[in-house]
Amino acid sequence: MAIQIHQIIRRPIITEKGLGVKELQHTVVFEVAAGATKTQIKEAVQQIFKVKVAGVRTANFPGKMRRRGRFEGYRRDWKKAYVKLAEGEKMIEYADNL
C-alpha cells in the first residue's frame, strides 16, 4: 500500500521544544502518518519543501486513556518525526511570527 507524500506529513509540531530544536540543531518536527517509514518521511520532506535531508528520527506515542465524566476512551496513537536538514540548507519557515 503506497502512501502519498501529502498524507505522510500531517502537520508541524509547534511547541517550545520543537522550536528550540529548530533553532539549535537545524531540525524540524512533524506529526507523520503512523505507518510511514523514515525513508518515506525523508522523501516527502524533500519533495514538499525542496530541501535536502540529512537524517530522520522517529518516535511513536501510544494513545492516552481519557475520561469525560463517566465516559472513557483512548486518544489515537501517533508518530513524531525529527527531520534534520543538511548543512547549508535554508530552514523551513512555518513558525516565524510566534
Image (spheres, rainbow, N blue to C red):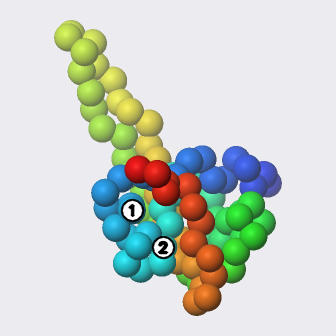
Residue extending farthest to the left is: 69
Label 2: which secondary element: strand
The one of 32 and 97 positioned closer to us in this rendering: 97
Label 1: which secondary element: helix
Residue extending farthest to the bottom is: 87
Q: Is residue 56 above or below residue 44?
A: below
Residue tagged by mark 1? 19
The count of marks equals 2
Q: Position of residue 95 (x, y in %)?
A: 49, 54
Badge 2 crowding class, 10 Å Cα cut-off, few under 14, some 14 to 19, many 20 or more, is many
- Residue at (66, 53) in percent of width and height: 8
Report if the CB atoms under discs 2 and 1 are less than 8 Å apart. no
Q: Position of residue 10 (x, y in %)?
A: 60, 47
Residue tagged by mark 2? 27
- Is any atom of residue 36 visible in this view? yes
Q: Amino acid at mark 2?
A: Thr
- Residue at (57, 72) in percent of width and height: 91
CA distance separating discs 2 and 1: 9 Å
